Amino acid sequence: MANKKENNSVLAPVNVIWEGILLIPISGTIDSKRAQGIMETILKKIIETKSKSIIMDVLGVVTVDSAVANHLIKITKATKLLGARCIVSGIVPEIAQIIVALGVDLGEVDTRADIADALELAFEVAGLEVVKRK
């Protein structure tokens, strides 16, 4: 059992970046097995932390095909079933072009350019506001 836990954290390290807000940085290649591990890890952490926002940063993902895009959609839908909002950040222009060319519909997926924009939305969901000190 400890081995499975270790593998899942390698698949998707989940970081609590604020109360109720998780960050999952994903890099490298995603296949079906890895996507399933990422989903399991995220869903367990949502329950454990009672988080309402999850930022899934895909800046380090090197390639995307329709299967990978569909896995990302499934992860966002599964988080929604647990009452959490999944925000995908870090889609670079090359990956965006591939997703559009593949005809994958990301219409229901919240996307933001970078982690800062995603965090702003997560704070909004949590009813929080960041104010610059004078």
Image (cartoon, helix red, strand yellow):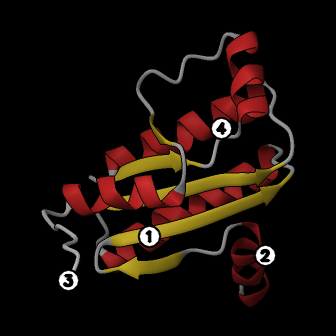
Q: What element carries label 3?
A: loop
Q: Distance between the residues labelled 2 and 4?
A: 18 Å
Residue occupying the point 73% across, 89% down: 2
| Left or right: residue 112 compared with residue 2 | left
Name the residue that disc number 4 marks. Answer: 71
- Direction bottom: furthest residue: 2
Q: Nearer the viewer, mark 1 or mark 2?
A: 1
Name the residue that disc number 3 marks. Answer: 133
Q: Is mark 4 on a helix, strand or loop?
A: helix
Q: Nearer the viewer, mark 3 or mark 4?
A: 3
Name the residue that disc number 1 marks. Answer: 22
Tell me if mark 4 has few (under 14), some (14-19) or many (20+) residues whose alpha carbon lies within 10 angstroms of its own: some
User: Looking at the image, is 97 positioned above or below residue 123?
Assistant: above
Q: Distance between the residues labelled 2 and 3?
A: 42 Å
Q: Distance between the residues labelled 1 and 4?
A: 19 Å
User: Looking at the image, is 57 positioned above or below residue 76?
Assistant: below
Sequence-first disc among 3 and 1: 1
Q: Which of marks 1 and 4 is in front?
A: 1
Under mark 1, the amino acid is Leu
Residue occupying the point 23% across, 76% down: 132
Under mark 3, the amino acid is Arg
Which quadrant is the C terminus positioned in?
bottom left
